[in-house]
Amino acid sequence: MLHAPIIGDGRPQLDMPCLLEMLARSSSRPRYAFMVLNLIAQVSRSDGSAGPLVAKGGGLIPLRDWLCDALTPMGQRDPRRVALEERIRSDLAMSGALPANVDQATAIIDDAIREQVRASGKTNVSRAVSELVRAGLLKRHYQGYCVDHHNRGAQRQAVYILSGCARGLIGGRQEQPRAVPRQAELAF
C-alpha cells in the first residue's frame, strides 16, 4: 500500500549535520560560532530576528552585550582570564582606587573585569557573526535611534536574522504571548 506523505507545519526542519558541516567549513572556530548561533536563536522572535535589545533582569541591554555576558562563563578558567583579573586587581591597588571595604573593592574589581571582558567579547562575537553571515546562516543589519540606517555608528545597534538551515533552530520553541494593551492603557 502507498501511504500519503506526512505534511509538516510549514516550519523549516533543522538538519543538524548539514548545519555543523557548514560551520566547520566556514568558521575558524566552529564551536564558538555554534554557541553564538544557538544563543541568537534562543532570543529570536518567530520571524527569526533577534535584537537590537534583549530583556535581562527587568531591563533591556543591547544584543551584543547580552551575547558577551552569556558567553563569559566559558572562559572563567582560562589562564589569560586569571592573569587579567590579577593585573586589574594590582593596577587598581597601585592607583589607590580600591576602598578599604572588601565588599566594595570586590564590586569595583568585578565591574572592571566585566568591562574588559565585554570589550574583547564584542570583538569575538562580531568575528563569529561575520563568519555566520558569510556562511549564509545569518543576516545582519543595524537599527538606529529613530530609523534603520546603513551607518554602523551613531548609536545604532545590531539586529541578527536567522536564515538558511539555521531557521530550524527556532522550530520547536514557543514564543511567549505578548500583552495586548487595553483601552485607556498606554504602552511604553
Image (cartoon, rainbow, N blue to C red):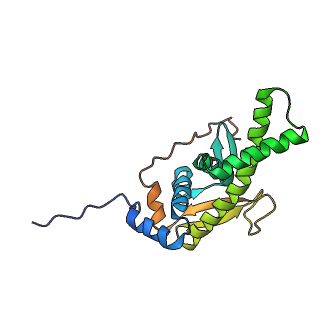
Is residue 45 among what the camera can see?
Answer: no
Q: Which quarter shows the N terminus?
A: bottom left
Q: What is the quadrant of the C terminus in the image?
A: top right
Residue that extends furthest to the top in the rendered view of this protein: 101
On the picture, is 136 further left or further right than 15? right
Seen in the picture, residue 180 relative to 16 is either above or below; the reply is above
**Residue situated in front as seen by the camera: 94 or 156:** 94
Quadrant in the picture for residue 150? bottom right
The vertical placement of 34 against 111, above or below, is below
How many marks do you count on the picture?
0
Residue at 47% in and 61% down: 167
Q: Is residue 105 left or right of residue 21?
A: right
Residue drawn at x 43%, y 69% as measured from the top left? 21
Q: Position of residue 93 (x, y in %)?
A: 85, 39
Residue 121 x, y percent position in the rendering? 67, 55
Give the x, y percent position of residue 105: 80, 32
In percent of the image, x 52 and y 50: which residue is there?
A: 42
